[in-house]
């Protein structure tokens, strides 16, 4: 069995390869090849632009692939959504497609764009959005550098953003959100019905979700005398349920827990003051719930 897997080429490529690494798959890319190597003999990878991924998965050229929910909806692709994977090119969160206009313009809402020109890569989705608001406007496909088009080449744009910094740098203001999107692992419908491929994809989903769950988390373990256990537990954040185990010396216990990495610098000194010893912080690749 060979699972043909599409890896998004372009802005999502590095984040995807890094996520797979955390999940336990080593993908090796080359600037000269669209066929990355992977350390799993049952998987064949191909680099495909995210905008085209859903179409190739729907047609069965690929068994599965990773692309944004935005491009699945834009293409109207009939595929199986195996997993929502909340990561993007700069962060591990959702992205937004926003309606943006020049800061100096008088446009305040989508209603003000009646009869105007809107530039975007997401043409069909934008048309549906406008129709839903009862607005008729000319939607033009943009081949890139969309932020620089208003006000000379377009009155407004619909563009994807994570932080809004590029829009602000081009003196644009957001007046509405057209849609939110995140990366999805999708599968061809026939491939999903194949027992071996489905099992492979379900395993992949579990590992990828585990890698995302571990982002921003670290493990912490320490030893503590029984007399100090209550004080140590009081330092740990509420609702955490650490694992407590007996050491060879019955008077001593081992405490193991998972914490947000951002809190550890404050917690470790308090644990030490509460009687914790041999405190070890360690990285996590996966947390499988």
Image: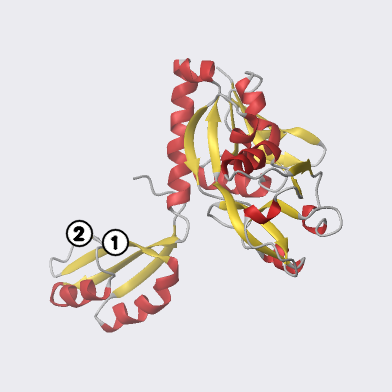
122 to 54, vertically: above or below: below
**Which scheme is used to colour this image of the protein?**
secondary structure
**Are the residues flagged by discs 1 and 2 in contact, CB closer than 8 Å?**
yes
Nearer the observer, 111 or 91: 111
93 to 226, vertically: above or below: above
Label 1 vs label 2, nearer the camera: 1
- With 198 as the anchor, is 136 left or right in this view? right
142 to 252, vertically: above or below: above
Q: Identify the residue position indicated by label 2 in the image.
A: 245
Callout 1: SS:
strand
In the figure, residue 129 lies in which quadrant? top right
- Give how far across and how far down residue 74 sits, in percent: 64, 35
Distance CA(mark 1)–CA(mark 2): 8 Å
37 to 114, vertically: above or below: above
- Give how far across and how far down residue 42 sits, in percent: 56, 24
- Give how far across and how far down residue 252 sits, in percent: 18, 69
Nearer the observer, 31 or 249: 31
Q: Identify the residue position indicated by label 1 in the image.
A: 256
- With 211 as the anchor, is 52 left or right in this view? right
- With 84 as the anchor, is 109 left or right in this view? right
The residue under the point 51% across, 42% down is 24
Q: Residues within 10 Å of mark 2 (few under 14, many from 20)?
A: few
In this view, the residue farthest toward the right is 152
Nearer the observer, 111 or 170: 111
């Amino acid at each position: 069995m060979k699972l043909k897997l599409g890896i998004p080429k372009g802005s999502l490529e590095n984040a995807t390869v890094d996520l797979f690494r955390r999940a336990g798959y080593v993908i090796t890319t080359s600037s000269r090849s669209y066929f990355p190597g992977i350390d799993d003999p049952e998987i064949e990878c191909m680099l495909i632009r995210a905008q085209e991924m859903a179409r190739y998965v729907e047609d069965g050229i690929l068994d599965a692939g990773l692309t944004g929910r935005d491009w699945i909806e834009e293409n109207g692709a009939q595929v199986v959504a195996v997993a929502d994977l909340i990561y993007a090119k700069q962060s591990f969160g959702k992205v937004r497609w926003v309606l943006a206009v020049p800061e100096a313009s008088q446009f305040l809402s989508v209603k003000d764009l009646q009869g105007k020109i809107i530039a975007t890569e997401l043409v069909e989705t934008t048309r549906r959005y406008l129709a839903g608001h009862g607005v008729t406007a000319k939607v033009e496909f943009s081949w890139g550098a969309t932020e620089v088009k208003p006000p000379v080449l377009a009155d407004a744009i619909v563009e994807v953003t994570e932080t809004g910094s590029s829009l602000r740098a081009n003196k644009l203001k957001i007046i509405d959100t057209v849609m939110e999107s995140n990366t999805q692992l999708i599968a061809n419908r026939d491939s999903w019905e194949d027992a071996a491929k489905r099992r492979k994809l379900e395993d992949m989903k579990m590992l990828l979700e585990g890698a995302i769950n571990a982002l921003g988390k670290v493990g912490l373990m320490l030893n503590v005398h029984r007399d100090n256990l209550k004080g140590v537990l009081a330092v740990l954040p509420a609702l955490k349920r650490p694992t407590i185990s007996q050491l060879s010396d019955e008077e001593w216990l081992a405490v193991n827990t998972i914490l947000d990495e951002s809190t550890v610098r404050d917690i470790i000194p308090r644990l030490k003051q509460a009687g914790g010893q041999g405190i070890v912080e360690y990285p996590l690749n996966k947390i499988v719930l």
